[in-house]
Image (cartoon, rainbow, N blue to C red):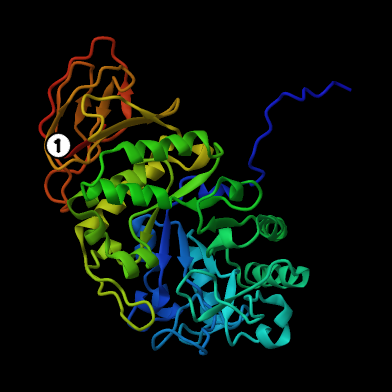
Amino acid sequence: MPEIDPYQPVPYMRVTHPAWSRNATIYQINTRQFTHEGTFRAAETHLSRLKDLGVDILWLMPIHPIGEKNRKGGLGSPYSVRDYYGVNPEFGSLADLKHFVAAAHDLGMYVILDWVANHTAWDNPLVEEHPEWYDRDWKGDFRPTPWWDWPDIIDLDYRQPALRKYMIGALKYWVAEVGVDGYRCDVAGFVPNDFWNQARKELDAIKPVFMLAEWESRDLYEAAFDMCCASSWYDAMHLIAKGRVDLNPLYVYYSWNEKAYPDDSIRMNFVSNHDKNSADGTEFEQFGEALEAVIVLSVVGEGMPLIYNGQEAGNPKRLLFFDKDPIEWKHHPLGDLYKKLFALKKANTALWNGKWGARMIDVPNSAHTRVLSFVRQNDRQVVFAVLNFSDQPQRVTFPDSLHHGVYIEYFSEQSLCSPRDLLWRVSPARSACRDTPQCFWGSRRSHPARPSCRRPGPCRAGMA
């Protein structure tokens, strides 16, 4: 028997991503606000549109009955769960949910449910049936999650084995009986990792699932989660877009992403979600004139891009969280931008997720604190991206040769050559998608030794 070399590296991740997630995008549905009816059946009428947009994974916010005791607002928070095996009648019936899931599957899309394992509503029957499953404060009383303004919920205590068995049983129910394809796990870091590891093992025994953590931690990837939220990416982009910092926080993020996280990990890039939209502001408020450039980076940079419902319609308002406030659907240029970008992500293998895709490689430029430039390439395809995140036009050159080649500019389909001595004029990012595309991008067609190139005209950002 050959001797095992103890110095061979051991892969950190023991999770196997579902094959269908290789070039997937994700879309968050706030069922209450998604349609005027606020039901699964009404949401189902949008599925063909979402498929055409390029969406693969549908993340449904919590679908369970909502607690009434200490409820916030008129309808309450969907994250205050009264019954883990029930369906909120506000959204429809169990049969309606099953029909929604089946319709999504028929279109080649996948559905994950938002799961709240950290806490329950005050009037969840478990409070009476198993009070020992709940955490207590110093007085011995049930307590909401400490330090947060969440008075409508109380925390569970995962030191209790029977609670763990119950919760994993509930997770398995929706996969086995309803056919959902995984979960987005609320405040996943507030629940012990070993619980999630056991849950993933038992869920995968039913069918391969996709697990998204609302958290940002390397440890969660080991045996439980496929993807975590890129919250620090969002924070860096917000500060950059507001002009408060240069690009250094973004470089720090990508350094940590490459060196501290497993090679096969997936980060979820978002420019909005239910929390950000309702509490902090719309994407227009958060990113201003840099919004298009931020969206572009969320799709062509490493990670899986998220759309929060309404972004594709240019939703201008902060949606109410505890009351009815439906989205007004209309055509908007940002929807066209997302559709075009998603098509590129699916077609260009360098932009795929995890190990299926390619690393971002920094391409130094003469305005490195203001202009981001990088290449993602494999043995088949390449993307060269240049994004100006300053509020001034930049004239940049690139001293290295990594990006050299003849490209197809993605929007115009015109050839573009990028040699070392080419001077790029890069205008500031704008928020409206009009005549000039946000970026140059495409697939490299060749690597000429002596390229004959024309000088490109002004552009907001470059990806070729």
The residue at 66%/49% (across/down) is 223
Q: Is residue 375 left or right of residue 207?
A: left
Above or below for 252 versus 27: above
**Nearer the observer, 290 or 110:** 290
Farthest right residue in view? 1
- Residue 335 visible in the current orientation: yes
**Nearer the observer, 286 or 44:** 286
Above or below for 233 versus 93: above
Q: Is residue 62 left or right of residue 419?
A: right
Q: Which quadrant of the structure image shows residue 137?
A: bottom right
Classify mark 1: helix, strand or loop.
loop
Q: Position of residue 298 (x, y in %)?
A: 35, 47
The residue at 24%/71% (across/down) is 317
Q: Which residue is mark 1?
A: 459
The residue at 25%/67% (across/down) is 315
**Nearer the observer, 245 or 286:** 245
Q: Residues within 10 Å of mark 1 (few under 14, many from 20)?
A: many
